[in-house]
Amino acid sequence: MGTKAFHEIRDPVHVFVRLDSDERTVLDSQPFQRLRYIHQLALTYLVYPGTTHKRFEHSLGVMELAGRIFDVVTDPSNTDDNIKQLLPELFKPDQRAYWRRVVRLAALCHDMGHLPFSHAAEEMLPDGVNHEQITAAIISSPELGEIWQKMTPPLRTSDVIKLALGPKKAKGQTFSLLEGLLSEIIVGDAFGADRMDYLLRDSYHAGVAYGRFDHYRLVDTLRILPPPPSGEDGQSDELQLGVEHGGIHSAEALNLARYFMYSQLYFHPVRRIYNIHLMDFLRAWLPNGKFETSPPQHILMTDNEVTAAIANAARTRGAAGEESARRIAKRQHFRLVYQQNPDDAKVNGQPARAVYNALCNYFDPALLRLDAKPAEPGSLDFPVRMHDGRIVSSLAISKIIQTLPAAVVDFVFADPGIATKVRDYVRSNRTSIIKH
């Protein structure tokens, strides 16, 4: 493949992120440079001042981790004959080098489709469109398509898209066993580099310890494994990322970190209400209340344009989105008046919605907001290889993973001017409201 220059970038999480000259070309592209101006955690910096980090450095971190994971799980000493038979491409030097390049670049590109302020603004996309589809369109764009073709050997655009999105998001794409497994290295639910990096990075910048876990030990013990036997004879042709028994505690720590980060940071009620005010502003400010989705228009819109518009609207009477902009710019956000209580949830499966509906009968609905989100799953099942070589389920070997609760968003908010009255009303009528 020839000699390529190498570059290194200082990183607070991984110390150094190293790229070769081809990867640097992607980093220097306009779609990737745009990520310098997309906050990783939306308006969370209004609650945790240190969380001003961007999708740019997160994407670099995901590439770094994905490369490490690939190297470990495809090391011949970490694989058995069955894996080598099922995935012969990974044990032929030229093909292994090709797929390593695709993994790293797909990891680098996986967030290119994010909107301003990341996930917080995704409701502002046209129906049926998500940020992953925009990512795929950017990877297929003329600018990046030319970069893929100039590499030696050229990369297939479809390979980059599949690995960047994964089977759940790459609708209409057929995945081979190899492609499905390699995409799991990047966006997998259990051990994806995306998840590992955002937990470590968000924890670091927020100044909290919740997201830290021994990712060095975890990566070193990751393996390509078949699922646990289900009673039939013979080995399965299915494969997924799993862990050696010696890494189970690091895997438990990852799952605990995820639970704590969701329950304490990502689902922080003040962070959530700022997201709601942001969505309210965007509905009023954007043409037709929606973002443009074509790559040329998408890459022109960043947090900078939205932040400037919020600042302008907050000081301009009658401007589109003035009220929502003022709540953001002047910290006049709605206040939390109800949060799901476990006792209430035993009586009513949707207690916050019940409270919100009751409040709308007594207060102006324009002064209230409901924030109810499906719970993030707590337990994740993955294979674990025991010391004797047998494969077992993580749910069978780890009580921590088996019993990990789901993080819940179930909030009601009210305008600051009526928040005290609303809380008093809820306190006086909670029992009857929840039972209704």
Image (cartoon, rainbow, N blue to C red):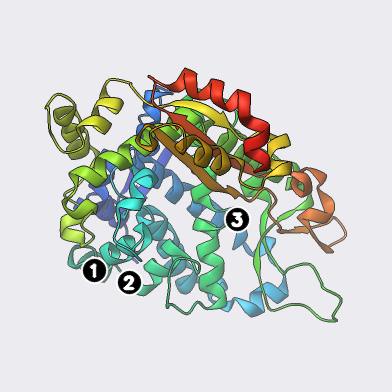
List x then y, in percent, for residue 248. 75, 47
Crowd band around label 2 with a 10 angstrom C-alpha radius: few (<14), some (14–19), many (20+): some
Report the amino acid beneath label 3.
Answer: Val
Task: Specify the quadrant that holds the C terminus.
Answer: top right
Q: Which mark is residue 145?
A: 1
Mark 2 or mark 3: name the one nearer the start of the chain: 3
Q: Nearer the viewer, residue 43 or 60?
A: 43
Crowd band around label 1 with a 10 angstrom C-alpha radius: few (<14), some (14–19), many (20+): some
Report the amino acid beneath label 1.
Answer: Gly
Label 1, secondary structure: give it. helix
Q: Which mark is residue 72?
A: 3
Residue sitting at x 46%, y 32%: 362
Q: Which residue is mark 2?
A: 157
Crowd band around label 3 with a 10 angstrom C-alpha radius: few (<14), some (14–19), many (20+): some
Residue sitting at x 43%, y 23%: 48
Q: Nearer the viewer, residue 431 or 396?
A: 431
Mark 3 or mark 1: name the one nearer the start of the chain: 3
Task: Specify the quadrant that holds the N terminus.
Answer: bottom left
Residue sitting at x 84%, y 64%: 390
Q: Nearer the viewer, residue 321 or 204?
A: 321
Q: Is residue 311 visible?
A: yes
- The answer to whether 80 is drawn above or below residue 392 in the figure is below
Label 3, secondary structure: give it. helix
Report the amino acid beneath label 2.
Answer: Thr
Q: CA distance from mark 3 to mark 1?
A: 29 Å
Residue 403: name its quadrant. top right
Q: Are marks 2 and 1 in contact (CB under 8 Å)?
A: yes
List x then y, in percent, for residue 225. 70, 65
- The answer to whether 138 is drawn above or below residue 262 in the figure is below
Label 2, secondary structure: give it. helix
